């Protein structure tokens, strides 16, 4: 419920910004043209690069003695539930809705404004830091900044949000997959016990 209200407020804000830009929602946020031919392979290749960086960072940090923090937040399956409804809501919110709204705000509004005022590289860098900070973890600050740089770079270079949305959706899907697999196994175990 909280996430639904949060995303509803963000979408309403984005609709207001589109009206202020005197454009349709799709035009205002560089979504008016369908993804070009290179969007999917570019987004997926950047997924490999950003995910590899995250894994190398994790290994190097642990080798240096910096352990990941014990999380105070519940796993995704505990948050959404491990039944079919919970898994469906988790995919919709975490894999689809979250990345699309974050890209519309951080690359469609923030990056666009920063690029016009400060230039391309400052805009990409500052929007990447904002992206990482919004994820609220010192442990993941560097990998999230790296992902934010990749998202900003491809959004800026392609002049479309589609490649960044594809990369962000794919990245979150990779993160959600272990929780989804564990939730699916628990659901099968419950059915088997009956």
Image (cartoon, helix red, strand yellow):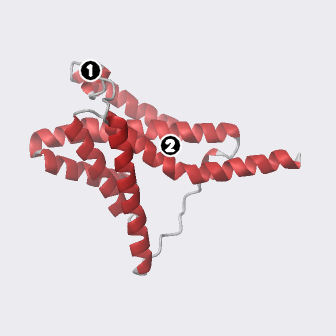
Residue 49 appears left or right of 90: left
Which residue is nearer to you in this view: 170 or 37?
37
Disc 2 from disc 1: Cα separation: 27 Å
Residue 82 placed where, x, y %?
68, 46
Q: Is residue 11 visible?
A: yes
Which image quarter holds the C terminus? top right
The mark found on residue 43 in the picture is none
The residue where tag 1 is placed is 19
Residue at figure coordinates x 43%, y 68% from the top left? 58
Tell me the SS state at disc 1.
helix
- Quadrant housing residue 80: top right
Quadrant for the N terminus, please.
Answer: top right
Mark 2 surroundings: few (<14), some (14-19) or many (≥20) residues within 10 A: some
- Given contact means CB atoms under 8 Å apart, are the residues at marks 2 and 1 in contact? no
Q: Is residue 151 above or below residue 24?
A: below
Coordinates of residue 104 in the picture (x, y in percent): 33, 35
Report whether residue 1 is seen.
no
Q: How many numbered marks appear?
A: 2
Look at mark 2 in the image and give the residue it sits on: 94
Q: Looking at the picture, how far across and down is residue 15, in whole percent?
A: 33, 25
Residue drawn at 51 percent across, 39 percent down:
93
Of 89 and 6, the residue lying toward us: 89
Nearer the camera: disc 2 or disc 1 = 2
164 horizontally vs 188: left or right:
left
Dot 1 crowding, Cα within 10 Å, few <14, some 14–19, many 20+ = few
Q: Is residue 42 above or below residue 185?
A: above
Residue drawn at the location 15% of the way across and 42% of the way down: 115
What residue is rendered at 47% in x and 75% in y?
A: 67
Indicate the secondary structure of the residue bearing disc 2.
Answer: helix
């Amino acid at each position: 419920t909280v996430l639904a209200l949060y995303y509803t407020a963000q979408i309403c804000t984005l609709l207001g910004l589109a009206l202020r830009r005197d454009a349709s929602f799709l035009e205002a946020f560089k979504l008016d043209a369908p993804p070009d031919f290179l969007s999917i392979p570019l987004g997926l290749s950047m997924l490999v690069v950003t995910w590899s960086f995250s894994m190398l960072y994790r290994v190097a940090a642990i080798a240096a003695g910096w352990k990941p923090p014990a999380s105070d937040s519940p796993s995704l399956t505990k948050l959404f539930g491990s039944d079919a409804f919970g898994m469906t809501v988790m995919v919709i919110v975490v894999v689809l809705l979250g990345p699309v709204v974050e890209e519309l705000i951080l690359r469609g509004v923030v990056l666009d404004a920063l690029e016009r005022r400060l230039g391309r590289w400052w805009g990409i860098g500052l929007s990447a830091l904002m992206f990482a900070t919004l994820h609220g973890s010192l442990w993941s600050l560097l990998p999230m900044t790296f992902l934010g740089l990749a998202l900003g770079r491809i959004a800026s270079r392609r002049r479309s949000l589609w490649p960044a949305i594809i990369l962000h959706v794919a990245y979150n899907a990779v993160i959600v997959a272990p929780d989804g697999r564990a939730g699916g196994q628990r659901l099968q175990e419950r059915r088997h016990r009956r």
